[in-house]
Image (cartoon, helix red, strand yellow):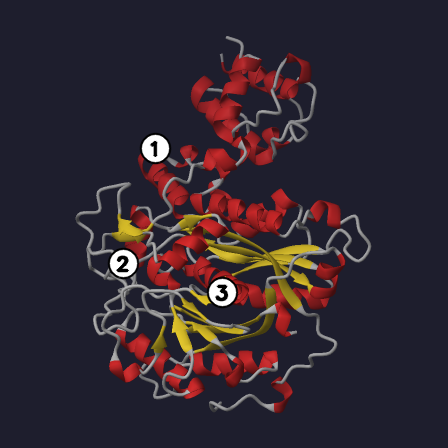
Amino acid sequence: MTITLDDLVLVLTECAGADDDVTLTGQNLDVPFTDLGYDSLALLETAALMKQRFAVDLTDEEVTGIETPREFLDRVNHAAAQAA
Amino acid sequence: MTLATPAAQETPERTGRPTAVITGIGVAAPNGLGTEQWWQSTLRGTSGIGPVVDYDASRYPSRLVGRIDGFEAAEHIPGRLLPQTDRVTRLALVAGAEALADADANPAELAEQDGYGEYGCGVVTSNATGGFEFTHREIRKLWTQGPQQVSVYESFAWFYAVNTGQLSIRNKLRGPSGVLVSEQAGGLDAIGQSRRTLRQGVKLSLTGGMDSSLDPWGLVSHLASGRLSRSDDPATAYLPFDTRAAGHVPGEGGAMLVLEEETAARARGARVYGEIAGYAATFSPRPGSGRPPGLERAARLALADSGLGVEDVDVVFADAAGLPTADDEEAAALRALFGPYGVPVTAPKTLTGRLYGGGAPLDVAAALLALRDGVIPPTSGIDRPVPEHRLDLVRGTPRHAPLRTALVLARGHGGFNAAVVVRSPEAA
């Protein structure tokens, strides 16, 4: 099962909220999270919730190294494939 | 160390020390959200004290609180800040925004100007209880679901300094910053520290305080102090200086104030409410030590700091603890300073409850608006003042009078005392 951008957006919004002026879409997969208004704590929170929802495990070190949505999706899907 | 009158070295060097003025006010109070709404309620004697309605408090010995009704955080706070902020921080952000708008001050723009620079604007606030409701929820998750479920934002959402932190980030206040934690005295200590930062070259410092800890765990914590009134009647539960005094009502809220170095404030055309002319803090010895409490000395030191005398004070905003011994001690200090019935004394906090870190800044806001409008806001409910106190309490209705100087007193649980002298701009 592949974790999609929609999955990420849902979890990210639940964990860290969202502002009307920024929408995470296919257009900004390579925009740094910090430019989208999400800091390292937001990503840690998101990773924790992803673990519960999708049973994918990322270490804190891996999470804080992630810079863009594309990287995040690549990492979680890689981890999901490993676990399978 | 003896209780002495202020020594020669404690008198101020008025020339050469930056003058601190207040140019903006933002308020969140149980009887009014927003400065003018709160001030009008305060003058009318409208109370914000009522029974707990958010949860079943019927088994608690104290069931009254000063709650801010109708505060919808999502209407004021961006979506991204909601998951990481306790109610107290949301209130601080809203009041901080109001104060900066009232001062017509944009710190990011000011940072570009000569004389300011990147670190020319700072923020120093007071808080006494931290982020209670947020933490209560996270601790519940810890013990019912496990540590993995605890929000990463708990790492800072609980902490006393978080209001300063979030105000700093949101408003680009990158200069000297901090938090003062001395319960109800902290709000004056924050203003004092804020004024101190002007000596480091800071031109604008957002100061004041905010507290909100009225959730079940917060209320229990306040109960543990043994200082809460057990009455169910909002009109008579919190009666400082009254023969029926039996504790206070805990409230939420406070005030944010924009404090500026005077020449910088005037240069940018800011409207000045008044000057923080003097500040002092003392610490009382433990009860039973035989040595006197420190409130009178704090007042004398603050006056010495301001270069003014007791005869200059037109009104006192009392700490008003609402417990007999503490009330007696404050009344004795006021008699020693001003003589019996020597100065009008008031406690508009009878309409809100004690607001801890937010309480004293709200009193400073009341003092500034009293000076502006030439009117002393009333103290509510004191129908049986203690005769031995011999205080000229402003009771029931506002008292109109020409006012130039106010003394604000505050005491914090554990022995903290603080005093601030507020001066009208016309008196300079």
Q: Mark 2 points at which residue?
A: B223
Residue B145, label in figure: 1
| Amino acid marked by disc 2 | Leu
* Residue extending farthest right: B114
Q: Nearer the viewer, residue B233 or B46?
A: B46
Q: Where is residue B167 in the image (x, y as percent from the top left)?
A: 58, 47
Mark-to-mark CA distance, 3 and 1: 52 Å
Q: Do labels 2 and 3 share a chain?
A: yes
Residue contact between numbered discs 2 and 1, judged by CB atoms under 8 Å: no
For residue B276, say whether it is visible: yes
Q: Where is residue B422 in the image (x, y as percent from the top left)?
A: 55, 70
Residue B370, label in figure: 3
**Discs 3/1, front:** 3
Mark-to-mark CA distance, 2 and 1: 28 Å
Q: Is residue A84 shown above or below B66?
A: above
* Residue extending farthest top: A1
Q: Crowding at label 3, few (<14), some or many (≥20) Cα neighbours within 10 Å? A: many
Judge left or right: residue B15 versus residue B391: right
| Amino acid marked by disc 1 | Gln
Mark-to-mark CA distance, 2 and 3: 33 Å
Task: Name the N-terminal-most of marks 3 and 1.
Answer: 1
**Discs 2/3, front:** 3
| Amino acid marked by disc 3 | Ala
